[in-house]
């Protein structure tokens, strides 16, 4: 199979405008594939691996992302044209993950909808600055810094079950 490997793709991206994309490179970048790699279930990953997946995806570190998410034999090579199906599977799993953990990702709204308060703005800015996963880690550890490394090794399903439960509990306690 011919294509641009993820490592080569990262090097091409670093060169940016310096490289003149020739016909062959453009052809390989636009190539489509129906070959499916086996992927891991994100619910079975550790929370630490899940967080790394999100970081690599945001930074477009596809090679590192695939090293965690894709199950492949030592002789298999992942090309850029294989990424589409890998990313579709990740998006499918994330959609299910969001549906399961509804108190975290789609909390019920009580009171006036759309009313912004100073408190809601400050909370939103706080989550944007530190990230939702850090906030959820703090909810589970309740500020005890000695527990963070232990909780990072929990499976995603276990971590988000408790985070979803504790977040839901906080929401329900605030309802009057």
Image (tube, rainbow, N blue to C red):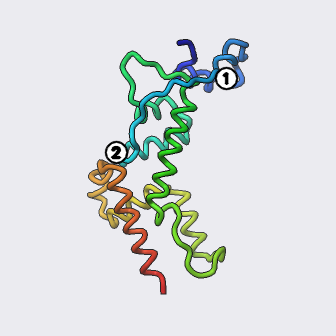
Q: Nearer the viewer, residue 152 or 70?
A: 70
In which quarter of the view is residue 87 placed?
Answer: top right
Farthest residue toward the bottom? 176
Q: Position of residue 25 (x, y in %)?
A: 66, 16
In which quarter of the view is residue 161 placed?
Answer: bottom left
Q: Earlier in the sequence, mark 2 or mark 1?
A: 1
Q: Nearer the viewer, residue 36 or 6?
A: 36
Question: How far separated are the C-alphas under marks 2 and 1?
Answer: 33 Å
Tell me the SS state at disc 2. Answer: helix
Left/right of residue 147 with respect to residue 129 in the rendered view: left
Relative to residue 95, is residue 72 depicted above or below? above
Residue position for label 2:
44
Which mark identifies residue 30?
Answer: 1
Neighbour class for label 1 at 10 Å: few (<14), some, many (≥20)?
few
Circles 2 and 1: CB atoms closer than 8 Å: no
Which mark identifies residue 56?
Answer: none
Question: Which residue corresponds to the image point at 51% horizontal and 33% vertical from the top-left?
Answer: 86
Farthest residue toward the front? 34
Relative to residue 111, is residue 1 depicted above or below? above
Neighbour class for label 2 at 10 Å: few (<14), some, many (≥20)?
some
Relative to residue 101, is residue 69 depicted above or below? above
Question: Which residue corresponds to the image point at 67% horizontal and 25% vertical from the top-left?
Answer: 16
Left/right of residue 95 with respect to residue 75 in the rendered view: right
Question: Which residue corresponds to the image point at 53% horizontal and 39% vertical from the top-left?
Answer: 57
Question: Which residue corresponds to the image point at 61% horizontal and 76% vertical from the top-left?
Answer: 118
Q: Position of residue 61 (x, y in %)?
A: 52, 33
């Amino acid at each position: 199979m011919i294509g641009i490997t993820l490592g080569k793709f990262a090097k091409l991206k670093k060169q940016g405008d310096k490289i003149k994309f020739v016909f062959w490179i453009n052809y390989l970048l636009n190539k489509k594939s129906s070959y499916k790699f086996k992927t891991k279930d994100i619910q079975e990953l550790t929370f630490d691996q899940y967080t790394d997946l999100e970081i690599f995806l945001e930074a477009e570190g596809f090679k590192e992302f695939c090293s965690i998410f894709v199950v492949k034999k030592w002789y298999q090579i992942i090309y850029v044209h294989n990424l589409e199906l890998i990313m579709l599977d990740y998006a499918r799993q994330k959609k299910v993950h969001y549906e399961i953990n509804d108190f975290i990702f789609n909390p019920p709204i009580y009171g006036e909808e759309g009313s912004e308060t100073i408190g809601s703005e400050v909370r939103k800015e706080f989550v944007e600055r530190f990230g939702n996963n850090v906030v959820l880690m703090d909810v589970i550890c309740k500020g005890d810094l000695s527990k963070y490394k232990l909780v990072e090794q929990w499976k995603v399903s276990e971590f988000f079950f408790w985070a979803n439960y504790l977040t839901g509990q906080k929401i329900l306690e605030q309802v009057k």
